[in-house]
Image (cartoon, rainbow, N blue to C red):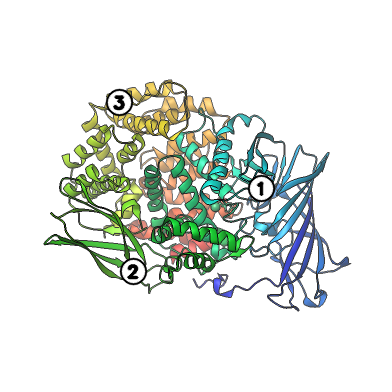
């Protein structure tokens, strides 16, 4: 990156000063909140004496500033203020400031802002500087004491409550933390409460704070929290460390949730759930995000990041931990398949386009643009590979050492790898390339069989990515199993360690040529390239003992077929139809797994796959082929669908557990196929009978998918008009199921709906994001959707640059398409870039996408 505004990892220096203790006092008021800060500071011995003191600060009205009680007249600039070394003692000193801020006008939702009358904060990554003057960087860790004054029923901050009275409360957080973990919440809230006794006997008060009326929708989040706390004790030996753990749900939030110490703040859609309002997917996501934020207490908070280049240190590890947790709570096989689907849909897409970047990037312009699938999901994959290479015991020893050695510190990827080297004796120099080199490796495989010896030949290619032309071979753990021609496993899962560009592995003493099952469990995040016949794929779908590869075989069969349908006009043949029919009816298989097998590859996935194999994807062609494929499957299964559905019926009330959810998922997959042959009769009945949101939305989707369901949509709207989270689904569904020709127009019409509150990120995402997620609609050759999405991003940008920039990744796939679409997409990006006053966030994104 050559942007002059860029910040570079190589420039890191410790901060000039240390902060030992922070005392903050907030007088809350929508237009003029007064923030008094008292910082106990001293020169940082690591830097020596005699440095100026630079404090970050943005949009703050400075009322007063003093050092050791002596007033100073320093003028802030746009990004902070500098106190010259001459004004600073060489010994500990106290710096006091008073500033004024206006939370009500804060539409960026960063710093202190208001969400429907509620005061709340978001400080990661650099929001604290919008609250007070401070060294806003993660390696400056301090203890915080916070007094909140305001005429409001609930006043919260980090740590333990130490004193309170009418209109004020004082909180003390005994654990030193970076400013990005600071939080404050105030307003009219009600608690859903419980208690948890930790393994050493600490009695912790747990509260989930919500708006009056929402108390009844907190039980699942609370249950997830308690299970997370127990799991982290049992699996990682990590115990909670305060007397209270508070979670608050807010309606206006740029991301999913935030791990502020002792006071997690959540997007309300990831907390509130009842069977009537939340789908099975919502329940699963709530469980995962509650766990994710809780797990950050150790991986992120107790051990934080030295600088933002190390973001994957906390995010990759915490995602890895929440994935393990969800697997333990539900099904490891199903969880792994879902995680890989998401990895390919988001991270592979990013890694193969102009926004590709390393898991640990070396420069950035706006850090908020780096909360990406690469940092999070590829960051987690890298940890999974490490664990595969050092084994479960090695991993456990390395993590114990990590917590022991770095508790209370701001650490780096070097620190992280050092604990693995020290605990296991393994040299990780080559492995470290996974952190510094972007791009999805391609792994080409051929094989031969001679005299009982079977040999697998691998070749890896590490493609060029923006700014990185030369790359070395990666360490690839390749999990392999071999089956004999009868389908019995003759070599159980073995992890081959590939370290060279080309490498072969031999298996001796085989009676017949085996069928290999390669990359079991998706043991490395690569594109596997191997010419495999449809028969062999069907064989693996039937016989593989590895559930991931069993699913993958069916998936590959579908993708091969779909690719032929798109490129040669082929029709679905009996091989795929019969193989899938067998899986659908195999009662020995988990219904959730069968539902995943029945899910057709998404259009965007097909476009990615076609592009990777040298084709120019045609969005309309892919859409039409996928519909034909679904129709063919529906015809093939028509006779068995009613019986399949009846066998999956759940008597009794709704439960959100994985078993019941899996049965519902398969039933709805069957209903969706059935709708294509019965004109929607069964789906209409299912909609009318639904007593839970999974089935209500599921049945409605089946109807919309066949171009019906208008009456049901209207009924849904009148039933749920008052519920924001449910209404987000109503908006998104109509766009998601619109025909490609109509998607932009449906979206445009919905932007005129009185409930299209575009300043609310959830609503904006459920409308504008739904259009950019509709592959054939977004890429419709008219260009109407490109223009509509761009117009809305430009409208949002001045108010909420973070969300506008995140959503601009809709355009990252432009290099895949034909010249007409490329031209339109690049024009749109150029138009954005040329917009006067464009935010740093969006201009960095548009600039990088254009290359
Ligand atoms: N650390 C949070 C993610 C997050 C990042 C930035 C935010 O505001 C801009 C909010 C949340 C997590 O990993 O959950
Ligand atoms: Zn996180």
For residue 563, the mark is none
Nearer to me, 298 or 692: 298
Nearer to me, 85 or 160: 160
Q: Which residue is mark 3?
A: 679
Query: SS of the residue at dot 2?
Result: loop
| Res 257 seen here | yes
Nearer to me, 5 or 782: 5
Q: Position of residue 256 (x, y in %)?
A: 55, 46
Q: Which residue is mark 2?
A: 499
| Tag count | 3
Q: Position of residue 516 (x, y in %)?
A: 22, 54
Q: Residue at x 72, y 56 (%)?
A: 131
Q: Residue at x 72, y 39 (%)?
A: 187
Above or below for 806 versus 766:
below
Q: Is residue 176 left or right of residue 524?
A: right
Query: SS of the residue at dot 3?
Result: loop
For residue 262, the mark is 1
């Amino acid at each position: 990156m050559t942007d002059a505004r860029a910040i570079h990892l190589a420039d890191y220096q410790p901060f000039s000063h240390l902060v030992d203790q922070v005392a903050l006092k907030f007088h809350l008021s929508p237009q003029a909140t007064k923030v008094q800060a008292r910082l106990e500071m001293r020169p940082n011995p690591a830097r020596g004496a005699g440095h100026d003191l630079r404090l970050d600060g943005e949009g703050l009205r400075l009322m007063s500033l003093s050092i050791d009680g002596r007033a100073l007249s320093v003028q802030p600039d746009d990004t902070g203020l500098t106190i010259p070394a001459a004004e600073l003692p060489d010994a500990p000193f106290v710096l006091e400031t008073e500033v004024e801020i206006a939370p009500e006008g804060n539409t960026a939702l960063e710093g202190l802002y208001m969400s429907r009358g509620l005061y709340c904060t978001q400080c990661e990554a650099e929001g604290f500087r919008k609250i007070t003057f401070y060294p806003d960087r993660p390696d400056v860790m301090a203890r915080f004491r916070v007094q909140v004054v305001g005429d409001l029923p609930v006043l919260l901050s980090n740590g333990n409550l130490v004193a309170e009275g009418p209109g004020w409360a004082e909180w003390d957080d005994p654990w030193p933390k970076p400013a990005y973990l600071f939080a404050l919440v105030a307003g009219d809230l009600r608690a859903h409460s419980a208690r948890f006794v930790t393994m050493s006997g600490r009695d912790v008060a747990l509260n989930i704070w919500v708006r009056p009326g929402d108390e009844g929708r907190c039980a699942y989040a609370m249950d997830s929290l308690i299970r997370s706390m127990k799991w982290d004790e049992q699996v990682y030996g990590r115990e909670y460390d305060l007397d209270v753990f508070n979670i608050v749900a807010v309606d206006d939030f740029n991301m999913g949730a935030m791990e502020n110490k002792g006071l997690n703040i959540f997007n309300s859609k990831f907390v509130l759930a009842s069977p009537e309002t939340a789908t099975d997917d919502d329940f699963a996501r709530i469980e995962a995000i509650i766990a994710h934020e809780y797990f950050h207490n150790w991986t992120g908070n107790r051990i934080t990041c030295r600088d933002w280049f190390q973001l994957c240190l906390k995010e990759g590890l915490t995602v890895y931990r929440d994935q393990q947790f969800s697997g333990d709570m539900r099904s490891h096989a199903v969880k792994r398949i879902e995680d890989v689907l998401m990895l390919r849909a988001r991270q592979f897409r990013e890694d193969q386009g102009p926004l590709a970047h390393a898991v640990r990037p070396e420069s950035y312009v706006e850090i908020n643009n780096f909360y990406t699938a690469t940092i999070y999901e590829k960051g987690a994959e890298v940890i999974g590979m490490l664990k595969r290479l050092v084994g479960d015991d090695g991993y456990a020893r390395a993590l114990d050492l990590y917590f022991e050695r770095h508790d209370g510190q701001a650490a780096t990827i070097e620190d992280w790898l050092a604990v693995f080297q020290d605990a296991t004796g393994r040299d990780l120099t080559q492995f470290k390339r996974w952190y510094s080199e972007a791009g999805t490796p391609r792994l080409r495989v051929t094989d031969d069989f001679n005299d009982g010896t079977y040999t697998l030949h691998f070749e890896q290619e590490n493609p060029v990515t923006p700014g990185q032309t030369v790359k070395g071979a990666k360490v690839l753990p390749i999990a392999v199993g071999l089956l004999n021609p009868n389908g019995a496993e003759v070599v159980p899962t073995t992890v081959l360690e590939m370290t060279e560009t080309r490498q072969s592995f031999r298996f001796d003493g085989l009676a017949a040529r085996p069928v290999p099952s390669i990359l079991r469990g998706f043991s490395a995040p690569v594109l596997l390239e191997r010419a495999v016949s449809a028969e062999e794929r069907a064989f693996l779908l039937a016989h593989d003992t590895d559930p991931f590869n069993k699913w993958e075989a069916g998936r590959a069969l579908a993708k091969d077929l779909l690719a032929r349908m798109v490129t040669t006009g082929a029709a679905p043949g009996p091989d795929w139809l019969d193989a899938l029919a067998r899986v659908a009816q195999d009662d020995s298989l988990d219904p959730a797994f069968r539902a995943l097998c029945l899910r057709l590859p998404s259009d965007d996935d097909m476009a990615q796959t076609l592009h990777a194999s040298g084709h120019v994807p045609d969005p309309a062609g892919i859409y039409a082929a996928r519909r034909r494929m679904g129709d063919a499957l529906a015809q093939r299964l028509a006779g068995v669908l009613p019986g399949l559905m009846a066998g999956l019926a759940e008597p009794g009330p709704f439960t959100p557990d994985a078993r019941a959810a899996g049965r519902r998922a398969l039933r709805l997959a069957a209903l969706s196929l059935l709708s294509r042959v019965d004109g929607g009769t069964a789906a209409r009945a299912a909609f009318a009978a639904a007593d839970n949101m999974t089935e209500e939305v599921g049945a409605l989707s089946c109807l919309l998918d066949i171009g019906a369901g208008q009456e049901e949509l209207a009924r849904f709207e009148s039933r749920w008009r008052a519920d924001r989270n449910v209404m987000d689904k109503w908006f998104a569904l109509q766009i998601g199921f619109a025909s490609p020709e109509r998607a932009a127009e449906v979206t445009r019409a919905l932007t005129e709906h009185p409930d299209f509150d575009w300043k609310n990120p959830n609503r904006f995402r459920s409308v504008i994001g739904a259009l950019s997620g509709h592959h054939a609609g977004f890429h419709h050759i008219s260009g109407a959707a490109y223009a509509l999405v761009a117009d809305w991003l430009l409208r949002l940008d001045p108010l909420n640059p973070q969300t506008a920039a995140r959503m601009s990744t809709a355009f990252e796939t432009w290099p895949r398409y034909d010249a007409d679409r490329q031209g339109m997409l690049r024009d749109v990006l150029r138009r954005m870039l040329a917009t006067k006053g464009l935010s740093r966030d969006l201009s960095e994104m548009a600039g990088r996408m254009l290359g």
